[in-house]
Image (cartoon, coloured by chain):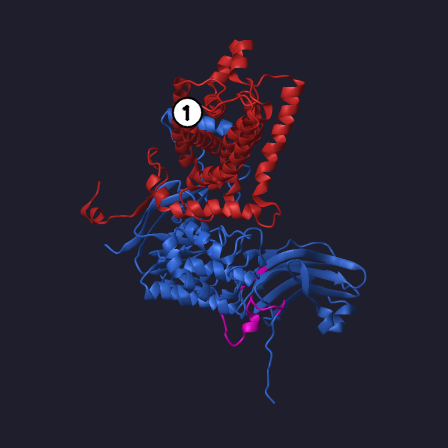
Chain colours: A blue, B red
Amino acid sequence: MSDIAIRAENISKAYQLGEIGTGTISNDLQRWFARVRGKEDPFLQVGETNDRTIRGKSDIVWSLKDINFDINRGDAVGIIGRNGAGKSTLLKLLSRVTAPTTGTIKVKGRIASLLEVGTGFHPDLTGRENIFLNGAILGMRRYEIKSQFDAIVDFAGVERYIDTPVKRYSSGMYVRLAFAVAAHLDSEILIVDEVLAVGDYEFQKKCLGKMKAIGQGEGKTVLFVSHNMGSIKNLCSKGIYLKNGILQQTGNIDTIISHYQKDLSYTVGDEQCEISFEPSPKQAYISHLSISNEHGLVKQEFDVFEQVVLNIKYFVNEPTLGFSPLIDIKKDGIDMFYSLLSDIDETVLEGQQPGEYNYRVKLHSPLKKGRYTLTFRLSKLRVGDVDGYEDILTFYVDEFSFDPTNKSYASFRKGLVASIFGWEKL
Amino acid sequence: MSTSATARQNWDLEIKPRNSIFNLHFKEVWAYRDLLLLLVRRDFVSYYKQTLLGPVWFFVQPALTTLIYTFVFSRLAGISTDGIPPPLFYVAGITAWNYFADCLNKTSSVFRDNAHIFGKVYFPRLIMPLGIVLSSLIRFGVQMLLFLLMFGYYMFTGAHFSPTWYILLFPLLVIIMAFLGMGMGMMVSALTTRYRDLIFLVTFGVQLLMYGTTVIYPLSTALQRYPELARFIELNPMTPIIETFRYGFLGSGSFSWGGLLYCAAVSVIITIVGIIVFNRSERSFVDTV
């Protein structure tokens, strides 16, 4: 029992949605009046779980609710969950940037938190000056920084520029220096938010290696948030899975990741991956659209190496000349792919017979990490659409796995799409 | 409450929704003293990097202000300066007032100015106001140099004034001013996290408050001409400071131990209240700013 490093007891955090600042005096007065009468805060009672997809009744939302966990000393713990699940809020509470609304967190040992790389770096100061300033902001004493100085500079690899203002640094050098300072903190607990997303692959590997060394070699406790399941698996042995501000599961990291990935196959908010439409008297109409994996499981998040399958179902009421279904895939508003059925089979242009048509379109994973939207249309050549929906479905490609033999798929490589390049030595 | 299992645990830190208001975190502030010095250094270095004249800019503002005050208030309006050469009289008041105003203005926007850092890393927030007070002290020092230069010049050319032993109170005056400015600033900063309108009120209010302090006129004149109004001017805790400052260096103005004690007491109270409200709002401000 005595080797618990962090214990969270019933911690919750409420946030106020919408405009803050208007009408707060009257709210404050109501709050004060309620307290005077010995009642509960009237604005906190109406809180509900933090589900972005459902529009809540109140302006108060619980970003975290009744979280309890123990973290043992020396554990490397990965915190996972979707965007908005409360991961960052939890880290903020642990690093004392903001106070919990209820509950207590008990901590044994000094915490160093790295919620962002290079907090407090001043562009006009030199690398040397910034190392001292940033170290002090993170809680180091001057002599501690001095004793670590050479190691920091060495890790960052910026010896040549150490007396140059950091505004002249390349962004890579900047990040390296900033991480180096934090990595050399002499603290018992290290909290790292998704800061490694910056920097190149080599550097990410170096950082992860350093964090692993901190955790295993030096016996320190590490808390790590990332969307990259690969690096979490690599670094952490335990996991905490948050969903809509509620603790879903704690325990072994592999169990937690598989639980999380199973949970991902559903829609987020109004970004749907499956939709049906009512029959229509038009010449033709779309009746059903969905995105699935190759086994037909409808889902929204895909791994880079996973096959994405688009399913389209439509009815033709009367044969129309020059008619063809059309798919348009966009990434961040840029057209990535554009495909018509008539590209493959010109006979459809003569008009399909009335009836139901069902098509399955397999994408052979040239997609890199990102958010993709799909447009489906039943178009009539040079005339316009019979039926169609712009950006109706959304899916995400993420890096749940990493293939060192196919690095061009990784988001840190340039290129909008990737493909398997057969390098042959002749 | 404490079972044997929890009693054996000695936690180094407990993060709770609210801390006791009497926990002023002084121990923590002391642990972060190196950060305080590095912040002061950062302010100084970053302010003048890539400027041509560097700290000379510290001179420009009080010098020009003195020039304008001499013209407007002394020549045009004919307000008495108690027989002291007008430029010397004004520069004394402006130098002291500027330090107070700097501390107050900068402290009152401390949450807004540092929202980014405060949102990402924890350190005792009190470090920031303390850093502001010390950084402003450098600026104040340079401006004192201007004052002393003029002091020496008028002394040398045989103007009518004589310093008194009360000049030795100078360090005490600076400390009182620093705490007064910081304490008031912290109160404002705590309120501005919720009601941002106050920021406008403060910048404007500080300007007006200067006219309610004996910066451009001696207290004696005010007492003579508008005795009722002068009572409010005497209540202003900055008035005894400026009067003592002038009394020490120039031998003019009114000095009383009572007045000094009064403003010292006010500044202690304001500082304590300021720290308490500051520490309270510090814990939740990240969510509102």
Q: Quadrant of residue B256?
A: top left
- Along the line of sight, the residue nearer the viewer: A384 or A398: A398
**Residue B118, percent from left and from top:** 47, 45
Q: Is residue A407 magenta?
A: yes
Read off the residue under disc 1: B165
Task: Tally the marks.
Answer: 1
Q: Is residue A94 magenta?
A: no
Q: Is residue B122 left or right of residue A216?
A: right
User: Going by the picture, which residue comes out furthest to the right?
Assistant: A382
Prevailing secondary structure class for the magenta stretch in the rendered image? loop
The chain letter under disc 1 is B
Q: Residues within 10 Å of mark 1 (few under 14, many from 20)?
A: few
- Along the line of sight, the residue nearer the viewer: B209 or B25: B209
Quadrant for the N terminus of chain B, please.
top left
Task: Tell me the kind of residue under disc 1.
Answer: Trp
Q: Is residue A217 left or right of residue A127?
A: left
Residue beneath the point at 61% across and 47% down? B51
Is residue A196 visible to the viewer in this orientation of the structure?
A: no
Q: Which residues are magenta?
A: A395-417
Which secondary structure, mark 1?
helix
Residue beneath the point at 33% across and 65% down? A216
Is residue A274 visible to the viewer in this orientation of the structure?
A: yes
User: Is A73 placed above or below B106 here?
Assistant: below
